[in-house]
Amino acid sequence: MLTLVTSKFGELPVRELLESAVFSDPEALEQALKLYGSNEDYELYAFVDEDEYVGLIGGCMNSARELEIIHLAVRPEDRLKGYGRGLILEIILEKKPSAVFTVTDEEGAEFFRNVGFQVMSSTLTDSGLEQFRCLYEVDEESED
């Protein structure tokens, strides 16, 4: 079960997971903390197992009920165990979006492809990094 942790992002386990979601970039971490701390449209959820934070997922829902995943992280020792997929499925059940999308790097695009997303397009950032837009259209029957 997911736990809303937007108000707890200062706690060390949540902060460490968020830091791994931004590849330990201090500037990106501060931007993420500011995003979740100052904008109520953006929510950060964690999966907690036996009082330990295993993973987190964060993003926002737009007016078309499309959920944008901005951050997704799983503790290194718990990767490749299905927690990333589980976080996505849980947030779909929680928020009931019409679609879910994210923009990620090549490694992330491969993960999202493996959990059922379509890789729709790619663009180059100003720094030359290739970014991929991934989309998952939610089957309304599977929401119930």
Image (cartoon, rainbow, N blue to C red):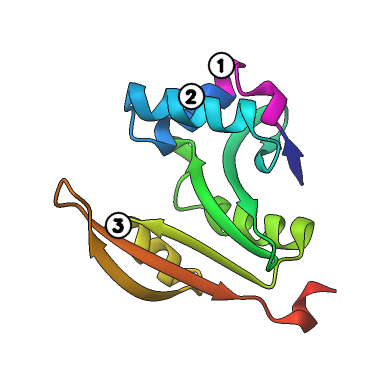
Query: How far across and down, in percent of the image, does residue 14 sit?
Result: 58, 26
Q: What stretch is highlighted in magenta?
A: 5-13
Label count reads 3
N-terminal of the two: label 2 or label 3? 2
Q: In this view, does 141 lie above or below 1?
A: below
Q: Which residue is drawn at 44% across and 22% down?
A: 30
Q: Which of 10 and 13 is in front in this view?
A: 10
Query: How far across and down, in percent of the image, does residue 63 sit?
Result: 69, 62
N-terminal of the two: label 1 or label 3? 1
**1 and 2 marks in contact (CB < 8 Å):** yes
Q: Residue at x 48, y 73 (%)?
A: 117
Task: In the displayed orientation, state which residue is furthest to the right.
Answer: 144
Q: Which of 61 and 108 is in front in this view?
A: 61
Amino acid bearing label 2: Glu
Check disc 1 and report the residue beneath it: 12
Q: Residues within 10 Å of mark 3 (few under 14, many from 20)?
A: few
Check disc 2 and report the residue beneath it: 16
